Amino acid sequence: MSTQLILSFIADDRPGLVGMLSQTVTQSGGNWLESRMAHMAEKFAGIARVDCPDAGSAEALKISLAALEAEGIRVSIAEARKAAGLPGTPIIIELVGPDHPGIVRDITQCLAARNVSIEMMETHTDEAPMGGGILFHAHMEVLSPPGLDQALLHGELEQIADALMVDLLLHPAGGDTPAAR
């Protein structure tokens, strides 16, 4: 029976990091299934899901990954459960506005209060055109639980967006008609 592992890693950015990780996975008999990685503030960080054919290869991989600490790569490992996808409605949330503390907190607290699951979230900042300060951008793919009133969720998020002075775009995943405010 195969074992799936979730690896999270961070190191000072330099060429060859992903090569070392993928070589370690392959040498231990593992198969690299999916990943997300990024360069941030002179660090390279990521998360990957790998499949090992059996418990022995999973243990060998854990030992080999721990040895990468000597190369400056810190790896955390967790066993993944093979769970069926959650039921619900996939929704895309995009927002942009002046950067300030609390944007992520306020939006995610609203989602958590309604049991909305964040499947993926990407954020970044950049300079506003014409020297208008720093803009915060967020793109979220969320899963709304069955039975949740979508209009109610949209209204609550709009109220938060107004208070935060950010523009909000909310639309079904794969949908062509976004509901912008």
Image (spheres, rainbow, N blue to C red):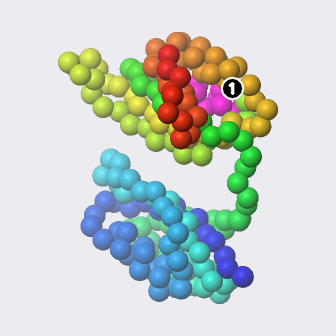
Q: Is residue 127 left or right of residue 92?
A: left
Q: Quadrant of residue 149?
A: top right
Under mark 1, the amino acid is Gln
Q: Residue furthest left?
A: 130
Determine whether 90 is above or below 33 in the image: above
x, y (%) of residue 84? Answer: 73, 58
Q: Residue at x 49, y 20 (%)?
A: 180
Q: In this view of the protein, which residue sits in the foreground, 30 or 178?
A: 178
* Nearest the eye: 172 or 129: 172
Q: Position of residue 26 (x, y in %)?
A: 47, 82
Q: Quadrant of residue 158?
A: top right
- Residue 23 screen position, x and y as percent: 41, 80
Circle 1 is placed at which residue position? 150
Residue 50 sits inside the magenta stretch: no
Q: Is residue 137 left or right of residue 55?
A: left
Q: Residue at x 34, y 52 (%)?
A: 39
Q: Is residue 111 magenta?
A: yes
Q: Which residues are magenta?
A: 106-113
Q: Does the rendering let one see residue 105?
A: no
For the stretch drawn in magenta, the main secondary structure is helix
- Tell me what residue is drawn at x 54 percent, y 36 percent: 175
* Residue lying at the far right of the rendered structure: 147
User: How dense is the environment of label 1, judged by Cα within 10 Å: few (below 14), some, or many (20 and up)?
Assistant: some
In terms of depth relative to the viewer, which is nearer, 144 or 61? 144
